[in-house]
Image: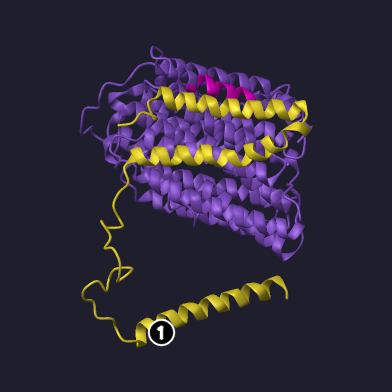
Amino acid sequence: MREALAFFSAPLLWPQLTLASGLLCCLASGMSRGVTGAASRTLGVVSLLVALWMLLFTGRGPGGPLVSLDGLGAAWQILFNVGALPVFLSLDEDDEVPASLLLGVCLGAGLLAASASLLMVFIGLELLSLPAYLLVARLPSASAPPHEASVKYFFSGALASCLFLLGMAFHYASSGSLALAPAPGIMGAAGLALMGSAALFKLGAAPFHFWLPDVYESSAPALAGFLSTSVKSAALFLLMRLASLGPDSALSAALPWIGALTALYGSLLALRQVRLQRLFAYSSVSHAGIMVLGVGAWAAQGCDPAAAAPLFFYGLVYLCMSNGAFLFIRLSGLSQRGDAAGYGTMRAAPAALFAVLLLSLAGIPPTGGFLAKLLIFWEAVKAGLYLPVAVAALASLVGLGYYLGLIRDMYFDEPKWRSPETETGAVPVLLWVCAAGAALLGVLPWVLKSYLERLFL
Amino acid sequence: MTGFALIFALLLVGASVAAFTAAGWLLGPRPEHEGDAELPYETGVRPASEPGWGLAALYWRYAVLFVAFDVDLALLLPWALNRPVLDLNLMVSVTLFVGLLGFMLLYFWRKGTLECR
C-alpha cells in the first residue's frame, strides 16, 4: 500500500497516465456545452502521440508488485497506439463518447503491456474489452442490425473473461501467487491452457472465432480496422506472455497447430463471402492464425524476448494492411464483393492503393506482407514445425483466390454501377499512408531498425 | 487424490445428476397442465406480468450507476475505519480515487443521467 504514490510517479506508467489524463480531458470537454467532437478527437490524437513519444524514455524493469515493463511491453504499446490513430483521425461524431471509449481501450492495452501480475493483466483486459463492446454499438456500419453484434461481442467476451478467471484460480492454486511466473504441476498447466484460450478467444483463433465476423461486419469500417489491429495485437501480446510462462507447456505445444488450422479455416471461409467487410473479417481470422503460429514457433525456441521481432514486424505490417483495407471500404462505400467490378476504371488512385494492400495481404513479394509471412514461416521451420508451416502456406495459397480475385474484378470487369463521390479529408491521406507502409516495409524494413533497437533495449 | 482423478470424479457426479434428471423426464409421468400448474408457485399472488419483459434502458442506467458507486463503498469503508493510522501516501491516493468518482458523478449529472423523468 505504501507504494501507492510510487505507482503513480513511476516513469514506467507515464504513457498510461497520459492516456488516462487524455480520457478525463475528453470527458470533461463533453461536459461544457459549446465543445464539439473535434476537440475530443484532437485530445485523443495528441495523447496517443505524447504516449508514443514517452515510450522512448520510460524506464525498464519492475515497478512494484503489479507493474513491470520490458522491451516487449514497450514495443507492443507502439502497436496499440499507432493502430488506434486511423480510427481517431477518421471519426466524424459530434460528441466525445467514441473518442473517450477508444482512449479507454488504448489505456487497457497499455496496462496489459506493463503488468507483472495476473490481477493487473485481468484489469487491463477488462478495461480493453468493455469500451470495445460499447464502441461496436456506438459506431455501427450502415447496414448493421442495431446492437446485435455488440451483444454477441459482449457475451463471447464475458465467456473469455470467465475462462481467464478460472485459469487464474488454477494458477493461484498451483503456485500460491498471482505473479506472472511459471506455476508448477498439472494445475498450473491447466490454468495456463484456460488463460491461453481466453487470449485465443480475444484473438479470434479457430475454434473461438465465431463472434468475430459478425462483429467486424457490423462495425463501422474504421472501427473494424482498429479492432483487427490494436485489440488483436493486445490479445497477441497476452498470448505471448502466457506462452513465455511455459515454453514447454501443453498450451505452447498446441499453438502451432491452432495457428495453422485457423489460417486455413479463415482463408477457406473468406473464399465464400459476398460482403466485403465480412471477407476481410475472415481474412483477419486467417492472419491471426499466422500470428498464433508465430507465437508457437517463438515458444518452441524458448521465448527469447529479442526473438519476438518477427512477430512485432508482422503486427506492424498487418496494422498497415488491415487498417488500409477497412479504410478503403469506408472511402469507396463498396459493400458487396461484386460492387468492386470496374472500380479501377472509375477511381484510379484509391483502386491502385487498394490493389497494393491486397497484394500485401496476399503475401506477394516485394510487399511487407510477404516479408512478414516469410519471417514467421522461417522461425517456424527453424523450430522444426514443418507440417504446420505447410498448412499455413496452403492457407496463404487459398488466400490468393480472394485477394487477387478482387484485383481482377476491379481492373478487368465492366463497371455495373456508379460509385459515389469519394470523400476528402483525413481518410484518403490515411489510405495513402497505410498502402505506403504495407509496400515500403517489404523493401525497406531496416528503416525501423534504429528506433526498434532503442525500444527493445 | 491427483488433480485428474478429482476432475474425473466431478465429471462423474455431474454426468450422473444429468442422467437422473433426464431419466425422470423420459420415464416419469408427464404432468397435466391445467389451472395454475405452469406457474412457479401454484399458491399465492399471481404474477403481474411475464418474466421475460424488457427493462427500459433508463432503468439500467440507474442500476449500473448504483452498482458502480455502491461497490466503491467496499473500499472506502475500511479506509474510513483505519483513517487514524494511514500515512500521507495512502491519503493522497484515496483522495485521487474519490476525486475520480466525483468527476464521473459530475459527468453523469451534466449529461442528464440523474434527472427524473
Give the residue drawn at x 34%, y 42%: A147
Q: Main secondary structure of the magenta part?
A: helix
Q: Would you name the residue on which mark 1 appears?
A: B23
For residue A274, side relative to residue A353 (left or right): left
User: Disc 1 residue type?
Assistant: Ala
For residue A98, side relative to residue A377 (left or right): left
When the figure is inspected, residue A348 is found, relative to residue A248, above or below; the finding is: above
| Chain identifier of the residue bearing label 1 in the image | B
Evaluate whether residue B104 shows in this view: yes
x, y percentage for residue A402?
Answer: 39, 44
B50 and A269: which one is in front? B50
Residue range highlighted in magenta: A17-27
For residue A129, side relative to residue A271 (left or right): right
Residue B70 magenta-drawn?
no
Q: The N terminus of chain B lies in which quarter of the figure?
A: bottom right
x, y percentage for residue A193?
Answer: 63, 58
B93 and A72: which one is in front? B93
Give the residue drawn at x 73%, y 24%: A9
When the figure is inspected, residue A317 is found, relative to residue A269, above or below; the finding is: above
When the figure is inspected, residue B42 is found, relative to residue A298, above or below; the finding is: below
Identify the chain drawn in yellow.
Answer: B
x, y percentage for residue A209?
Answer: 47, 52
Chain A drawing hue = purple
Dot 1, crowdedness within 10 Å: few (<14), some or many (≥20)? few
Of all residues shown, which one is farthest toward the top? A34
